[in-house]
């Protein structure tokens, strides 16, 4: 079975530009969360969506937004990019895919964003 | 505020040794804890989890211990192998799906 998939793998943007990152959850999972991981640190929570509704938001500016589609895939948008937005953006999904815990989050490989 | 920290940033062991990675958390309301393994260039990989109503949970070659009295979490890896070399994160959650991660411990396994 396919795990969480993310696209693109790598992305290079310049300051002030906008970026859209995409995530497809594990089949059957209804919850998607986004995390930002700066080099050398642990992931930081950005958003969580469940059944297309925002369930949680981390301490990130309004330049960051997200949405979830009817097929449970998700997009993360970042406007007016800053150098400090350079990071690995991780998507995680959770849900009752095989009768296991609904709390366990499984991560995708991430999108490496570089802002020049 | 919420925080999850690790005592040792780097742990070096010999192949075949047992490894212990420690983690301290500050939010006594946290009710679910997870250990993730992250290899270079990859996303975090789920290793094992434990709920706050448990003290110990075992998986294949891994054991997680939870001490709520001192708010301490540990991951034990038996017979450590070179393939176990990675950064290990503990994470906690108090609410629906928001994980709070620490900065990580790098495990280096020498053959």
Image (spheres, coloured by chain):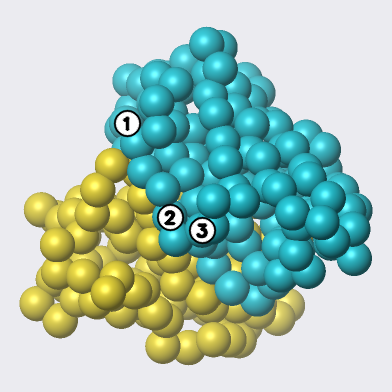
Disc nearest the viewer among 3 and 1 = 3
Q: Which residue is mark 1?
A: A102
On screen, residue B90 versus residue A41, left or right, reads left
Tag 2 or tag 1, which sits nearer the N-term?
2
Assign the N terminus of chain A to one quadrant of the image: top right
In this view, the residue in front, B68 or B64, is B68
Give the colour in which the image draws chain B.
yellow
- Alpha carbon separation for disc pair 1 and 2: 21 Å
Q: Nearer the viewer, residue A11 or B85?
A: A11
* Residue B57 % position (x, y): 26, 54
Quarter holding residue B55? bottom left
Q: Residue at the location (21% across, 70% down)?
A: B27
Q: Which residue is mark 2?
A: A58
Q: Residue at x 44, y 61 (%)?
A: A59
- Residue A39 in percent (x, y) is at 69, 71
The residue that disc 3 covers is: A60
Q: Do callouts 3 and 2 mark residues in contact (Cβ within 8 Å)?
A: yes
* Circle 1 chain: A
């Amino acid at each position: 079975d396919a795990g969480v998939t993310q696209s693109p793998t790598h992305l290079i943007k310049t300051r002030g530009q906008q970026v859209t990152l995409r995530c497809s959850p594990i089949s059957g999972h209804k919850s998607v969360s986004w995390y930002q991981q700066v080099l050398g640190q642990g992931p930081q929570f950005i958003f969580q969506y469940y059944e297309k509704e925002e369930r949680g938001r981390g301490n990130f500016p309004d330049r960051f937004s997200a949405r979830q589609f009817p097929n449970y895939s998700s997009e993360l948008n970042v406007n007016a990019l800053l150098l400090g937005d350079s990071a690995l953006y991780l998507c995680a999904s959770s849900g009752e895919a095989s009768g296991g815990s609904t709390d366990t989050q499984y991560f995708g490989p991430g999108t490496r964003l570089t802002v020049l | 505020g919420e925080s999850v920290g690790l005592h040792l940033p780097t742990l070096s062991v010999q192949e075949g040794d047992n490894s212990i990675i420690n983690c301290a958390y500050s939010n006594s309301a946290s009710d679910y804890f997870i250990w993730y393994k992250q290899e270079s260039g990859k996303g975090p990989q789920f290793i094992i989890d434990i709920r706050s109503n448990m003290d110990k949970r075992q998986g294949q070659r891994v054991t997680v211990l939870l001490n709520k009295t001192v708010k301490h979490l540990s991951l034990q890896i038996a017979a450590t192998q070179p393939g176990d070399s990675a950064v290990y994160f503990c994470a906690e959650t108090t609410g629906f799906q928001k994980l709070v991660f620490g900065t990580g411990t790098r495990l280096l396994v020498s053959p």
